[in-house]
Image: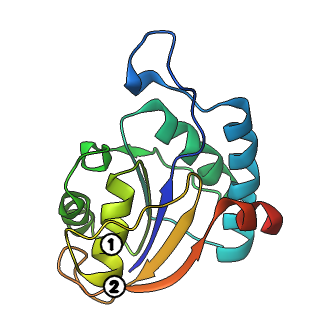
Amino acid sequence: MQLHILRHAEAEDSAPSGMDADRRLTESGQKRMRLVARAIAKVLEPEYDAILVSPLVRARETATPVAAACGFSRELRETEALLPHAPAHAVLEELSRLKCETALLVGHEPHMGKLFGRLACGEAHLDLSMKKASLAAFESDGDPASARWELKLYLPPRILERLG
C-alpha cells in the first residue's frame, strides 16, 4: 500500500462562528495548496483509491485541490480518525477496513506528527511534527494497522511549491 499524509495548509486564526472546526484556509494557504497540489500530481502521479479528511473545514479545503489535480473524482471520505487528538492507530484501522492500495490522509497536528512517528518508527508515542502543507509518503506490503512502513519521502511546502 502507498500512503500519503498531508498536513492542512495555513488557516485563519479564528472563524467568524468562533468554532475551531469552521476555520478556513487563508488566501495564502489556498494559493500554497494550489501549488502543492500541482506538485503532488506532477511528481508522485498518484492514483488514489481513497482520500480521507478530518471533519474540520481546513482539512477538506486542503484536500480538494489535491483531488482535482490528481483526477480523483470520488467523494472525499470524512473521518473522525483524523481529528487533531485522535489516536494514530484509529485511521490505520479504518484503512484496513477500506482495503485500498493508495490513499491520502489530510489532517492536523498533533495527530499528523504522531501518525508520522508511528509509521516511520513503529512507536505510538513518538511525535514527528509536520509543517503545514507538507507531505510524507510511506509504503507497506501488509495490513495498514499492523504493517511495518517505509518512509519514501518527506517534502516540506517550499520544495513542493517549487516542484509545482
Q: Is residue 58 left or right of residue 163?
A: left
Hey, which residue is sitting farthest top in the picture? 17
- The residue under the point 64% across, 75% down is 44
Measure how far apart labels 1 and 2 are at the Cα level: 11 Å
Against 37, residue 78 (above or below) is: above
**Residue assigned mark 1:** 117
| Residue 149: image tag | 2
Against 158, residue 65 (above or below) is: above
Q: Between residue 104 and residue 108, name the one nearer to us.
A: 108
Please provide percent x and percent y for residue 138. Answer: 44, 79
Quadrant that contains the N terminus: bottom left
Tag 1's secondary structure? Answer: helix
Dot in front, 1 or 2: 1
Please provide percent x and percent y for residue 110. Answer: 34, 52
Please provide percent x and percent y for residue 28. Answer: 73, 37
Colour scheme of the rendered structure: rainbow
| Amino acid at the residue labelled 2 | Trp
Quadrant that contains the C terminus: bottom right
- Could you say which quadrant of the image residue 131 lies in? bottom right
Against 152, residue 86 (above or below) is: above
- The residue under the point 59% across, 52% down is 67
